[in-house]
Amino acid sequence: MAGYKRDRDENMGQKADAAVRSLALIRASGSTARVLNLAIVYDRCNGEPEHQEQPFFRNAALNRALVLKHVVKPEEQHLLQSRRLNTTKIVFPYSTRELELGGRSLLFHERRFERVLRDFYDVNDGQKFEADLAALRVLDALPSFDPFLIRERLRQNGFEPARCYFDLSPADITRMHMFVAREIEQLVGLAYSNGGSAARDLSQRLADKLMSDATAEPLEPLRVTLRLSPEEYGEGVFAWKGFLYYKWAVESLLPRLAVFHQEMLTARVSGADERLRLEIARMRARILDMANQAAQHVQSALTEYGVAFASLVDGNAADFRGFLLRAPSLFIPVGEAIGVLEHIECVWRFRFPPGAPRVFSAEDALELYADFEATLDAMVCLAENGEDQYL
């Protein structure tokens, strides 16, 4: 990045970046729905054949970076090609093992983005640069970085990085563990009709195996029961994890959406004439209606999963097998809907922290609501063709 004077060190001392929070904490949590942590994948998988043969990005520095969904701060607006409320941020850490040392950052929509990014590539790396730039455009268009949504959207655009890039983070696995164990306990109950500690212990062990990378061999009886080939089983377990992840995410999202809905209805706008008040009211009503539709699509997909899983619990493996094989096609509409709803709630909470007065100017309201409308309009599950395909 020679000549790039505005390196903007992401040092987590007094110059802490509110969007990144702490690179050390990001390392502890791995990837989240707002952070794609390629540094931790590099440390964990570098040297493995699939990591070398199917990299996420062709450029080595970019393939060890952190990619984040970033709320643009007022002092950053002048760097961008046009005014935006959010963008994609790339952090190139000085050390993948010691993220607390900081790194250099770059915003996707900066005026000099392509020129600065090209400095990472050799002069003859034109094809690698164009391929990585195309993959970055796919990431920037996504509302979140949940691994299931990323994988399907990349595959749709001709990119197939190695499976290791799409593992759930250790922190997410830890948070999901009890939830998954409760889900699996329904299956274990078939073997332990009286339930009790034996069933709970087995559920915990099966949850560990299902959520870990080493799922194929320990759960071989399940593969046989579902009549899946080893390759189909790998994809099927990935799909099962996806819907467990979405079901778990929705448990915490829906209560927060209810709060967002109420706060949005009661937020006050100052400095608006009658025309602006009517326009803001129209936008608000449309946003809440589309958010409700998106939540209903998610609930419908989770209900479909629930019906298929109940069939497995009842001894009908065929229905669950069929669901797992087609589940990846649902990742885009479901993942995008959850990601968009998470994004809207997160941006609202960033703008109005708990306890803060919910009052903003007409100009700010129009900008925020326009961003919400555009984000919701882009969802596959609400698009005219996408809705027919999904339903």
Image (tube, grey):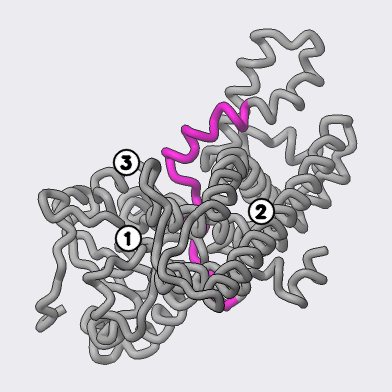
Please state which of residues 22 and 159 is positioned toward the viewer in this rendering.
Answer: 22
Taking the spot 60% from the left edge, 55% from the top edge, the residue there is 338
- The numbered dot on residue 375 is none
Which of the image's four quarters has the C terminus?
Answer: bottom right
Asked whether the viewer can see residue 155, the reply is: no
N-terminal label among 1 and 2 = 1
Please state which of residues 322 and 289 is positioned toward the viewer in this rendering.
Answer: 289
- The numbered dot on residue 235 is 2
x, y percent for residue 274: 54, 74
Q: Which residues are magenta?
A: 157-181
Query: How crowded is the residue under tag 2: few (<14 C-alpha within 10 Å), some, or many (20+)?
Result: some
Residue indicated by mark 1: 66
Cα–Cα span, label 1 and label 2: 26 Å
x, y percent for residue 67: 36, 63
Which type of secondary structure does the marked residue at label 2 adopt? helix
- The numbered dot on residue 28 is 3
| In this picture, residue 314 sits left or right of residue 108 | right
Labelled pair 3, 1 in contact (Cβ < 8 Å): no
